[in-house]
Amino acid sequence: MGWKAVGGNFPESIFFKEVGDEVIGKYIETKQIHTKDDKDRTIYILEVAGVEKTLWGSGLLDYLMKDVKAGQTIRVVYNGKETVEIKGKKRKCNQFSVEIETEE
């Protein structure tokens, strides 16, 4: 009797460094995970150039992704940081746009 590992490796994360950075990939699924720092987070699994990658959610990204369906090809563009007020406190938040590939 032996043991076989399950679950595989956690997909590599997608990071945006510069305004205009983008990722294009096929949306696979959304997962809810519980992090080491005791927070519940949303992650989006995308297939980019044949490899599964992880896109970490945020308030804005979660809102933008709500109507994206599994199997659709999307483009996520990083639009920089913007100062917004959240619960009475000003914070710099990452800004994104999400587009769905069309037949046009």
Image: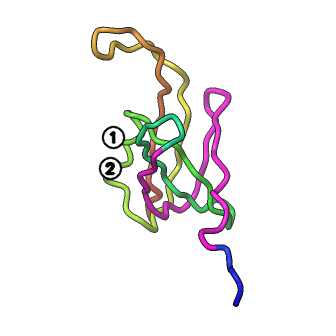
Q: In screen coordinates, is 92 left or right of 22?
A: left
Quarter of the image with the C terminus is bottom left
Rate crowding at label 1 as few (under 14), some (14 to 19) or many (20 or more) other CA atoms within 10 Å. Answer: few
Q: Which residues are magenta?
A: 6-34
In the rendered image, which quarter contains the N terminus? Answer: bottom right
Nearest the viewer among 44 and 73 is 44
**Disc 2 target residue:** 66
| Residue positioned 53% across, 28% down in the render | 79
Task: Identify the residue at image location x=52%, y=20%.
Answer: 81
In the structure shown, which secondary structural element does the residue marked by tag 1 occupy? Answer: helix
The vertical placement of 82 against 3, above or below, is above
Q: In the rendered structure, which amino acid carries the disc numbered 1? A: Tyr
Q: Amino acid at mark 2?
A: Lys
Residue 9 within the segment the image draws in magenta: yes
Residue 57 x %, y %: 46, 41
- Looking at this view, is 12 or 36 the one in front? 36
Q: Residue at x 39, y 9 (%)?
A: 90
Residue occupying the point 28% across, 9% down: 88
> Element at badge 2?
loop
Q: Position of residue 84 (x, y in %)?
A: 38, 14
- Circles 1 and 2: CB atoms closer than 8 Å: yes
Depth check: give the residue in front, 54 or 101.
54
Measured as percent of width and height from the top left, residue 27 is found at 49, 60
Residue 63 is labelled as 1
Based on the picture, tell me whether residue 81 belongs to the magenta stretch: no
